[in-house]
Image: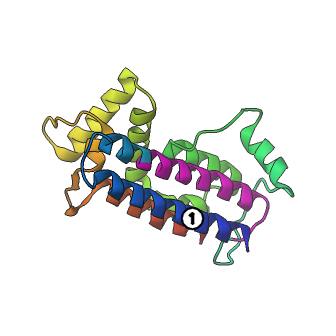
């Protein structure tokens, strides 16, 4: 099986599992609900970060997208090991949470006009929101909590009394109240992943 197709299928499987965990955590509501919702979100976001990194490595080594298209690359390598060394630049890992940093990284590697940035650009707003939620769940800092408060205020208006990300993720999405923010973010990541991998 082609590398990028395998990455795509793996992400979509993980996304389906996260959706199932999210639903399971809500039925019925219980003491585990908030932790389950946040775990489902973190796993979903972690899978998204991994897809971005592994797709970058694949395209740097000349792999085709799942639809057979080539991704022109200014920093191509022959091996995955060397591509990872170039990408990490002696760091232990790199972050895939900030949309603007990811865009700049891809612009440096694949040129100013590239398929990767084009794939995620329509999701920029939601990706930035998801980064705030990820940081709030993962870090108990004043800055993360302030960013979360601003996100809930901007999305829901007024002064919403939502204590933690789980409450926001399970809240009805204003443009389609039958769906929640978790549902919205899962849908956005699914479309972005398919667009990214072809």
List the residue tagged with mark 1: 196
Q: List x then y, in percent, for residue 30.
A: 26, 44
| Residue 73 visible in this rendered orientation of the protein | no
| Label 1 CA crowd tier, 10 Å (few <14, some 14–19, many 20+) | many
**Whether residue 16 is situated above or below residue 2 in the rendered picture:** above
Q: Quadrant of residue 63?
A: bottom right
Q: List x then y, in percent, for residue 65.
A: 67, 71
Residue at 60% from the left image edge and 64% from the top image edge: 10
Q: List x then y, in percent, for residue 97.
A: 51, 42
Q: List x then y, in percent, for residue 55.
A: 66, 59
Apparent side of residue 188 relative to residue 163 in the rendered image (left or right): right
Please check the rendered image and state whether residue 50 is part of the magenta-colored stretch, yes or no.
yes
Residue at 73% from the left image edge and 44% from the top image edge: 87
Q: Which residues are magenta?
A: 40-64
Residue at 36% from the left image edge and 47% from the top image edge: 37
Please check the rendered image and state whether residue 41 is part of the magenta-colored stretch, yes or no.
yes
Apparent side of residue 188 relative to residue 72 in the rendered image (left or right): left
Apparent side of residue 53 relative to residue 89 in the rendered image (left or right): left
Q: Quadrant of residue 138?
A: top left
């Amino acid at each position: 099986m082609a590398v990028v197709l395998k990455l795509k299928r793996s992400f979509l499987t993980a996304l389906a599992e996260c959706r199932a965990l999210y639903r399971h955590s809500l039925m019925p509501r219980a003491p585990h609900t908030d932790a389950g919702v946040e775990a489902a979100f973190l796993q979903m976001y972690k899978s998204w970060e991994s897809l971005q990194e592994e797709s970058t490595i694949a395209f740097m080594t000349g792999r085709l997208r799942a639809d057979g298209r080539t991704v022109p690359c200014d920093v191509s390598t022959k091996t995955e090991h060397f591509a990872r060394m170039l990408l990490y630049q002696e760091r232990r890992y790199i972050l895939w949470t900030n949309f603007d940093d990811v865009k700049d990284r891809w612009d440096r590697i694949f040129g100013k006009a590239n398929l990767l940035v084009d794939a995620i650009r329509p999701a920029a707003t939601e990706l930035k929101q998801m980064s705030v939620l990820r940081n709030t769940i993962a870090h108990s800092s004043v800055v993360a909590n302030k960013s979360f408060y601003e996100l809930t205020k901007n999305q829901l208006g007024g002064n919403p009394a939502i204590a933690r990300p789980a409450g926001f993720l399970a809240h009805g999405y204003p443009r389609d109240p039958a769906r929640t923010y978790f549902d919205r973010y899962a849908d956005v990541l699914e479309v972005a992943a398919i667009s990214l991998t072809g």
